[in-house]
């Protein structure tokens, strides 16, 4: 602010904040340039995201850049949150519409957003389920945290048992130890059901993406309770063979430096570790 940059804090925490609202955070990551170009993905504004500092080994992330009309959705999301922060209410959004002309293409993409204001309806979780249900050949997911409800696990297992190649990449090196332990606790039913799980060996994978052979999402959404129910999130839903293939290629490259989790090793965890993970799971919606 000292340098002329306007800053707004969404749902600030203070000593009188109701504990219920401590959870309702904005997890969205959006950059809009002149209303014509937009970025979203897992990347925050911090040195580790550019690997300028080494906190958890090599930091791996995924983001997407859009130009033209698709940018408008991200502009609207930004200003909706800006107004919720009490900054410049009732803006005329239309003056920020895209103006620059870009070459047209046939790519279908749709900006998505979600948050606790939509509960009990959760559009992003519903979209993820549709991507899972509609997969015919493969279903690839990258997420730093894998703390999901049993019915979503069952959907992934059903896909794997129907012959679909289901793979999930999670971090080898954690940024939050208890969440890592919860993630590992969730491995069991998935591994037993035929889902392949790999851990990104060079460091921490912060990517948030899901694709099948036809479409996918890149954005801010983790595969966990917080992203689906407690946080404000955003992303880009895309249906285009070329774009999906590029995301697929990046996933395969990441997989090549990852180690596959073995179900027998998972079953042979120590009694103490199993007990601790079981207790953690009882509080999984709070962690």
Image (cartoon, helix red, strand yellow):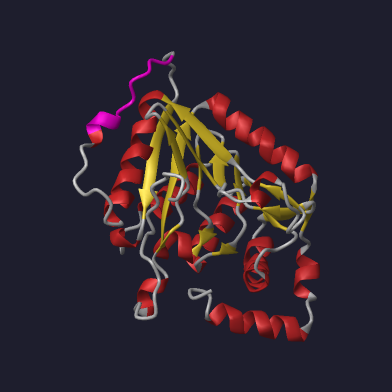
Where residue 24 appears, x then y in whole percent? 39, 66
Residue positioned 70% across, 81% down in the render: 274
Q: Dividing the picture into quarters, in which one does residue 18 lie?
A: bottom left
146 to 128, vertically: above or below: below
Residue positioned 38% across, 15% down in the render: 101
Where residue 231 appears, x then y in whole percent? 42, 61
Where residue 33 appears, x then y in whole percent? 43, 31
Query: In the picture provided, is 25 more to the left or to the right than 189?
Result: left
66 to 221, vertically: above or below: above
Query: In the picture provided, is 187 more to the left or to the right than 76?
Result: right
Can residue 216 be found in the magenta stretch?
no
Where residue 17 appears, x then y in whole percent? 35, 77
Q: In this rendering, does residue 167 appear at all?
A: no
Residue nearer the viewer, 227 or 36? 36
Residue positioned 58% across, 58% down in the render: 157
Q: In this rendering, does residue 118 appear at all?
A: yes
**How many marks overall?**
0
Residue nearer the viewer, 42 or 86? 86
- Which contiguous range is marked in magenta? 94-102
166 to 24, vertically: above or below: above
Helix, strand or loop for the magenta stretch, by majority: loop
Residue positioned 50% across, 61% down in the render: 152
């Amino acid at each position: 602010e000292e340098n002329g940059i306007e800053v707004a804090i969404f749902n600030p925490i203070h000593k009188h904040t109701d504990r219920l609202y401590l959870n309702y955070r904005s997890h969205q990551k959006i950059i809009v340039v002149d209303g014509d170009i937009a970025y979203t993905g897992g990347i925050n504004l911090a040195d580790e995201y550019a690997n300028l500092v080494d906190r958890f080994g090599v930091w791996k992330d995924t983001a997407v850049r859009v130009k033209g009309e698709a940018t408008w959705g991200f502009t609207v999301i930004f200003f909706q949150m800006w107004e919720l922060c009490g900054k410049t209410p009732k803006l005329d959004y239309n003056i920020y519409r895209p103006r620059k002309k870009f070459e047209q293409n046939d790519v279908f993409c749709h900006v998505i957003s979600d948050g606790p204001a939509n509960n009990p309806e959760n559009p992003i979780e519903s979209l993820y389920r549709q991507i899972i249900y509609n997969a015919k050949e493969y279903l690839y997911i990258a997420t730093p945290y894998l703390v999901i409800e049993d019915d979503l696990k069952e959907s992934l297992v059903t896909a794997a048992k129907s012959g679909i190649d289901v793979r999930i990449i999670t971090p080898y090196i954690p940024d939050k130890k208890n969440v890592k332990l919860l993630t590992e606790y969730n491995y069991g039913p998935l591994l037993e059901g035929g889902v392949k799980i790999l851990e990104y060996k060079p460091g921490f994978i912060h990517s948030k993406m899901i694709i099948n052979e036809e479409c996918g999402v890149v954005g801010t959404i983790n595969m966990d309770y917080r992203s689906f129910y407690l946080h404000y999130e955003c992303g880009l839903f895309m249906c285009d063979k070329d774009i999906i293939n590029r995301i697929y290629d990046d996933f395969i490259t990441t997989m090549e430096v990852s180690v596959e989790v073995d179900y027998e090793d998972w079953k042979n965890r120590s009694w103490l570790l199993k007990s601790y993970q079981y207790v953690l799971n009882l509080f999984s919606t709070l962690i």
